[in-house]
Amino acid sequence: MSELLKLRNYINGAFTDAADGRTTEVIDPTTGEAYATAPLSAEADVDAAMAAAAAAFESWRDTTPSERQRALLKIADAIEARAEELVAVESKNTGKPIALTASEEIPPMVDQIRFFAGAARLLEGKSAGEYMDGMTSIIRREPVGVCAQVAPWNYPMMMAVWKFAPAIAAGNTVVLKPSDTTPASTVLLAEIIGEILPPGVFNVICGDRETGRLMVEHRTPAMASITGSVRAGIQVAGSAAKDVKRVHLELGGKAPVVVFEDADIAEAVEGISVAGFFNAGQDCTAATRVLVHESIHDEFVAALAKAAQDTKTGQPDDEDVLFGPLNNANQLAQVTGFIDRLPAHAKVEAGGHRVGDKGYFYAPTVVSGLKQDDEIVQNEVFGPVITVQKFSDEAEAVANANGVEYALASSVWTKDHARAMRMSKKLDFGCVWINTHIPLVAEMPHGGFKKSGYGKDLSAYGFEDYTRIKHVMTNIG
């Protein structure tokens, strides 16, 4: 057996082991075997990272927007220059296809960092003026302070960018914890970023749920930000409430995809299958829940099942695959459990089984015949599984689309512009796509309602979340 790769924390500009020496194994999901170890950070490590971030904040908050912009642009250039290395590490840690990770993740990551570099110089607010006789008022936008950030395992590199880029652009300092199953690419990002930012501005500590809890409950951070499950978000919000910390939550999703009778079926099936199966369906915005008009239901289901059968999962170096394995053994068990517990009225049209006996691969799956209160309709599967339900009219489509606890993303497929506009108003989701599903751009916000959380990633709105507003009034009489 080859020696395991050793990952380390990055605190105050230096790589270090956990203070008590504890580690966890990092598993390659294509094999189910350990390939690395990472620190299992505890209270002493969290204290050290928070102290470093707090000390660095004293000077980083006073940097000018142009200085922060230059730093972020250097980071974007460095990531672009080391893209091949980052992709290799990300693929090893997640099992993602190498070619797709290089084409679909590195370019938006770099673009998003460059966007926030520009946003640093474009904060807006009310103009200074006399809103009371003899008094001049001005608005200051200030960084909030140290930010405790917890990233998920589905897009480790990209979600790290969504966390640190706006925070640092606004003048904050960061303590970031990657998922315990996918720390490798975040540790490499720390190496890259550490060559550009002053010590303590960006810190990475590896660990488990307990590590995350210690970060959120620590008295130093002014803000806690998490992308993760609803359960984790509720725990973070509860913990942060004790110190009245700001909280930014991007949680689960159960995106409805409403397909009307006038939709182009071939175009819809192609777009929905890719948006549902990409990254093994491990995406909060994935096209997971199709609602299709009864008049085209059978034709649509047959076409979607064929698309699933033609979609390939496999090893990272296979350029013909759309997605790799599920992230971990628990996730494989969760997806398998949903299929095993399907009600008698449900029908598996394609897939519904594990692929191979090594690693955590699962076949692209389509399930039809479902009812609104079925478990697989109501709860997030987070796997390559697309469900299909019938609807008879627009009102029923809206009711069923909104009839879940999640409210992150949705899409509508129709040639009727007025209907598309009505649906975009009635759908209770943070994003509504029309005749497409899943494209994101740095300039537009990403975030949901209800149990999908609150706060926005990306865009100027996401940037403003990492600032606080101060009113300064001067007596000029």
Image (cartoon, rainbow, N blue to C red):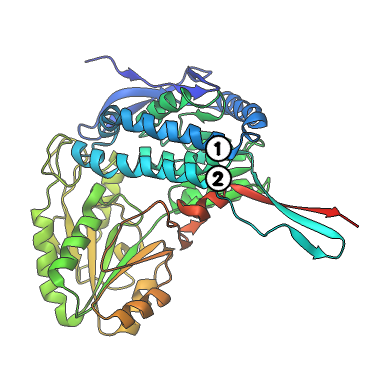
Which residue corresponds to mark 2?
A: 121
- Amino acid carrying label 1: it is Ser
Element under label 2?
loop
Going 64% across and 43% down the picture, which residue do you hit? 144
Give residue 463's position: percent from left, percent from top: 53, 49
Q: In the rendered view, would you say 258 is above or below 172?
A: below
Give residue 225's position: percent from left, percent from top: 53, 45
Element under label 1?
helix
Label of residue 66 in the image: 1
- Amino acid carrying label 2: it is Arg
432 vs 417, nearest the viewer: 417
Q: In the rendered view, would you say 296 is above or below 141?
A: below
Residue 329 horizontal side relative to residue 39, left or right: left
Determine contact: label 1, label 2, CB under 8 Å. Answer: yes
Label of residue 176 in the image: none
Going 42% across and 40% down the picture, which residue do you hit? 161
| Quarter assignment of residue 43 | top right
- Visible in this render: residue 289? yes
Going 36% across and 22% down the picture, which residue do you hit? 37
